Image (cartoon, helix red, strand yellow):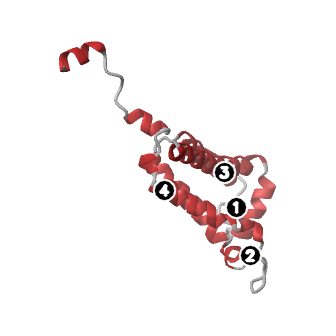
C-alpha cells in the first residue's frame, strides 16, 4: 500500500506543479515573460504564445494528475521538466554562486523534479490508482459468468 500511495502522491505533485506553472503563464504574464526572456532565451516570448503554452502545460499537468494517457504525458512532462533543468543548470552545478554568476540555490530542486519525473516513468505500470490502470482492469465478473466457468 505504501508504494501505491507514494506513486499517487508523486503523480499528483508532479502534475500539480505543471498546473501551477501553466496557470502562472496565463494569469501572471509579465512575470512569466521575464522568466522566458531570462532563462529560455525568449522562446515563446510573444505575448499571445505564453497563454497558449500555459494552457498546454495545464492540460499535460491535468492528465498527469489523473493518470490518463501516461504513455504520452509522462514523456512530455519529462521534456518540460528537463527544459527547466537545463535552463537553470548553472544553479544546480553551483547553487551558491561561488564560481558561476547569476545562480540561485532555490533552483536546485529542478534536479529533484527531473529525477521524480524519471521515477514516475520508470514505475508507470505499478501506479494502480491512475485512470489508465482503472481502464485496463477487467470489470467485475457476474454471477452468471462465474456459474458457467465453474
Q: CA distance from mark 2 to mark 4?
A: 27 Å
Query: Left or right: 4 with respect to 46?
Result: left
For mark 1, give the secondary structure.
loop
Q: Nearer the viewer, mark 2 or mark 4?
A: 2
Q: Nearer the viewer, mark 1 or mark 4?
A: 4
Q: Earlier in the sequence, mark 2 or mark 1?
A: 1
> Would you name the residue on which mark 2 appears?
95
Pointers 4 and 3 in contact (C-beta within 8 Å): no
Q: Nearer the viewer, mark 1 or mark 3?
A: 3
Spot the residue most to the bottom.
99
- In the rendered image, residue 81, in percent from the top left (x then y), is placed at 60, 60
Q: CA distance from mark 1 to mark 4?
A: 24 Å
Label placed on residue 45: 1
- In the rendered image, residue 139, in percent from the top left (x then y), is placed at 36, 25
> Would you name the residue on which mark 3 appears?
17
Q: Earlier in the sequence, mark 1 or mark 4?
A: 1
Q: CA distance from mark 2 to mark 3?
A: 22 Å
Position of 104 relative to 1 (above/below): below
For mark 3, give the secondary structure.
helix
For mark 2, give the secondary structure.
loop
Q: Earlier in the sequence, mark 2 or mark 3?
A: 3
Which image quarter: residue 93?
Answer: bottom right
Amino acid at each position: 500500500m505504501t508504494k501505491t500511495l507514494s506513486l499517487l502522491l508523486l503523480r499528483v505533485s508532479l502534475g500539480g506543479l505543471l498546473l501551477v506553472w501553466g496557470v502562472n503563464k496565463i494569469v501572471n504574464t509579465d512575470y512569466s515573460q521575464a522568466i522566458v526572456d531570462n532563462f529560455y532565451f525568449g522562446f515563446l516570448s510573444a505575448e499571445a504564445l505564453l497563454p497558449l503554452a500555459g494552457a498546454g502545460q495545464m492540460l499535460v499537468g491535468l492528465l498527469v494528475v489523473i493518470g490518463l494517457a501516461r504513455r504520452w504525458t509522462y514523456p512530455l512532462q519529462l521534456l518540460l521538466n528537463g527544459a527547466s533543468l537545463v535552463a537553470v543548470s548553472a544553479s544546480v552545478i553551483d547553487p551558491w554562486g561561488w564560481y558561476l554568476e547569476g545562480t540561485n540555490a532555490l533552483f536546485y530542486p529542478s534536479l529533484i523534479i527531473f529525477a521524480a519525473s524519471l521515477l514516475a516513468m520508470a514505475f508507470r505500470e505499478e501506479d494502480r490508482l491512475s485512470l489508465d490502470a482503472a481502464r485496463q482492469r477487467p470489470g467485475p465478473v457476474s454471477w452468471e459468468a462465474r456459474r458457467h466457468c465453474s
